[in-house]
Amino acid sequence: MLYSFVLAAVVSVTLSRRVAALPSSFHADHSGPEVLAARQQQPSCLLPSLIQSASSLTGQEPGTKGIKRGQVAATTDRDNFINFCEGQTLTNGQQLAGGSCNGIPMGSLPSAQNMISAVITNPRPGDRLPSGVGFNVTVQTVHLRAGLFANPATNYYTAPQELDVAGDVYGHCHITIQDIGSMTTTTPPDATKFAFFRGIDDAGDGNGLLTARVDGGLPPGVYRACTLIAATTHQPVVMPLAQRGAQDDCTRFEVTGGAISAAGAAEGAKVIGTSGGGSSSNHNANGSGGDSNGAKIILTSGARSNSESSSNAANIILTSGARSSSGSNNTSDSGQQRVQQ
């Protein structure tokens, strides 16, 4: 009896120490750490109460709702694929170019009201940007709790998707830009090749607006910029419904080797008229017609501007022979084109 009592005490202390050593998740809006130990102290097997019976069905059993022609039978496993990766190379937190198998659960799915949506606000579709000049890619998101960015070298796909107390997905956004050759291309670009890639690891402006800076700009070409919205450990975010709007966005734009003209450039962008050409845009620093705040309108020799914008601190730089009918303050810059960042 005494032996059994001592043994039980030793086991209890050992388990307590092991539980205390288990990792916890910390998030800014939690009153304290979300201790994972409580649900991780079980043996390395799936609890019977967590088994989802749907995984044992193909979805094509007679009488099953939703059956339609052309569907295939789903792969089944009565144990929810807990050992699915047996015999395969495990991802184990690494980005393995040769492929791997990841057994980490998908995690928590948001409600339909908390599904992520995004739109790229700069560059705009069809924008023409000067080569070699840095610019911002900006994206407005909703229902993404941005700024949660795990170490991609050691924790790639290592944890399930999680939600904050409001039901929004913890995660971040990546920006990827590829040269697609033409605005009307019908050839999918090579996914292994990209001109620019960046993970945005901050929370942006706190209202869903995120920014990635393309320092030094891009060489001439036609490009597609896309968002890749991910959970904290970089897996693509998972939504609760199949029929929905996309959570990611893409836009196409052009980078030219010379001077350009583009209406409605975003904040800090440049509207440039080429020799003999003209610019008649209503220029707005935020990307729509109206007032221009902090924008630069640059006209080279022989160009003219009919801009009706009311320029607030805008710099309109005219080279030799250029004409402007704008009511803004004009500064002459004889013979030299200037593109300012």
Image (spheres, rainbow, N blue to C red):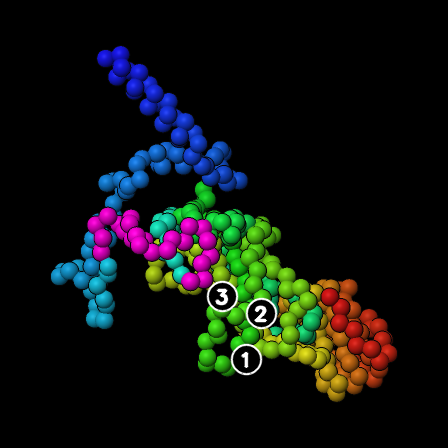
Residue of label 2: 195
- Residue at 75% across, 87% down: 276
Q: Which residues are magenta?
A: 76-98
Q: Does label 1 or label 2 sit earlier along the sequence?
A: 1
User: Residue 126 appears at what percent x and percent y?
Assistant: 58, 76
Nearest to N terminus: mark 3 or mark 1: 1
In this view, 332 is above or below 117: below
- Residue that badge 3 annotates: 249
In magenta segment, residue 93: yes
The quadrant in which the N terminus is found is: top left
The kind of secondary structure element at disc 2 is loop
The CA span between labels 1 and 2 is 12 Å
Q: Is residue 15 above or below residue 308?
A: above
Which dot, 3 or 1, sits closer to the camera? 1
In terms of sequence position, does the residue under pointer 2 or pointer 3 come before the other? 2
Look at label 3 and name its amino acid.
Answer: Asp
Looking at the rendered structure, the kind of residue marked 2 is Ala
Q: Is residue 39 left or right of residue 147?
A: left
Q: Is residue 101 magenta?
A: no
253 sits to left or right of 15 = right
Q: Position of residue 4 (x, y in %)?
A: 26, 17
Residue 289 seen in this snapshot: no
Mark toward the viewer: 2 or 3? 2
- Residue appearing at x 19%, y 56% in the figure: 57
Tell me the kind of residue under disc 1. Gly
Which mark, residue 181? 1
- The residue nearer to you, when weighing 226 against 7, is 7
Q: 335 and 132: which one is in front?
A: 132
Residue under the image location 75 percent in, 72 percent down? 339
Q: Mark 3: few, some, or many residues within 10 Å (few <14, many ≥20)?
A: some
Report, in whole angstroms, how far the alpha carbon at label 2 lies from the one at label 3. Answer: 17 Å
